Amino acid sequence: MRWGVDVDGRRAGSGRGAQVPPATVARLPRYLRALEAVAAEGGVLTSSDELAARVGVTPAQLRKDLSFLGSYGVRGVGYDVAHLREQVRAALGLADERRVVLVGVGNLGHALANYAGIPERGFALVALVDADPRVVGTTVAGLVVQPADRLADVVAETGATIAVLTTPASVAQDVCDRLVAAGVVGVLTFAPAALRVPPHVDVRAVDVASELQILAFHEARRAAAGEA
C-alpha cells in the first residue's frame, strides 16, 4: 500500500507532480502544528532553524522535506508562515474539509468524538455508529448514534470518506469491509487487529498497548545496561 501525496495535494500515483516520500508525509502534520503555533504567537516569518527546533528535526531535513512541496524559503528572510501553512495543508489534502464517521462509541469513542483537535485540524465528525442498542439513539458530541445496520446509508448520506474504528478486534475486519464497500477510502483503527483493504484504501493503526510494550522494552534495556 502506498502512502504519499503529490505536490498538488492529491494522492500519490495520480500522475501529476512529484511523489512525497512516506517519511516526509509522516512529518508534515508536525510541520503544520508548528506553523499554526507560530501563527498563533503572531509570527509572520519563520526560519528553517526555528521551525526545525519546534518539530525536533534538523534544519537540513526540514528544508529537504519542504522542497518536495516546492517551498524553498527566501535566503535571509525565511518562510512566509501563512503561505507555507497553506502549502502543507494542501499537501495533506486539507484544502477541503474531510468528513469522518466514527464506528464504536464506547469509552474511547466518546473521548474521540469530543476531541477538539478533530475540527481544529480541518476534519468534520459527521456521524457516530454503534451496534449496542443501549448506545444507539443517544447523543454524543451533538450527534445521534446510528445503528450498525445503517452503516452504508450513513456513509452515503453524510459523504464521509474517512472512518475511525474503535470496535473490538473480532468485528473490525467486517466493519472495515462494509465501510470500504460504502465508499470510505481512509481508515484510522484503534482495534488491535491487522486490517486487509484494497490498494486504493489507506489504513493507519494506533495500538496503544503495543506502543506501551515498546516503551517497556526500551526501559528494561536501559535498566539492564545500568546494572551491567
Image (tube, rainbow, N blue to C red):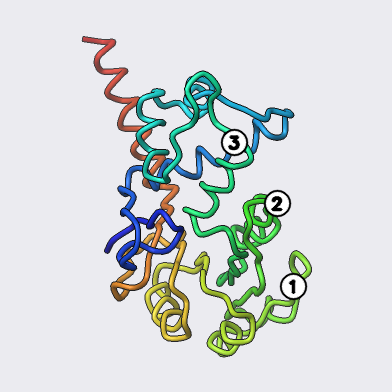
Q: Earlier in the sequence, mark 2 or mark 3?
A: 3
First along the sequence among labels 1 and 3: 3
Residue at left offset 65%, top offset 66%? 125
Q: Earlier in the sequence, mark 1 or mark 2?
A: 2
Q: Quadrant of residue 195?
A: bottom left
Q: Is residue 206 above or below residue 185?
A: above
Where residue 86 sits in the image (x, y, percent)?
Answer: 58, 48
- Verify CB contact (< 8 Å) between mark 2 and mark 3: no
What crowding class fits label 1: few (fewer than 14 Cα within 10 Å), some (14-19), or many (20 or more)? some
Helix, strand or loop at mark 2: loop
Query: In the image, what residue occupies the spot 42% across and 38% down?
Result: 66
| Residue 143: mark | 1
Q: What residue is shown with label 2?
A: 116
113 sits left or right of 71 in the view = right
Q: Residue at x 41, y 47 (%)?
A: 209
Picture coordinates of residue 20, whole percent (x, y): 34, 50
201 and 62: which is toward the camera:
62
43, 211: nearer the viewer: 43
Q: Amino acid at mark 1?
A: Leu
Screen quadrant of the N terminus: bottom left
| Residue linked to disc 3 | 35
Q: Quadrant of the C terminus?
A: top left
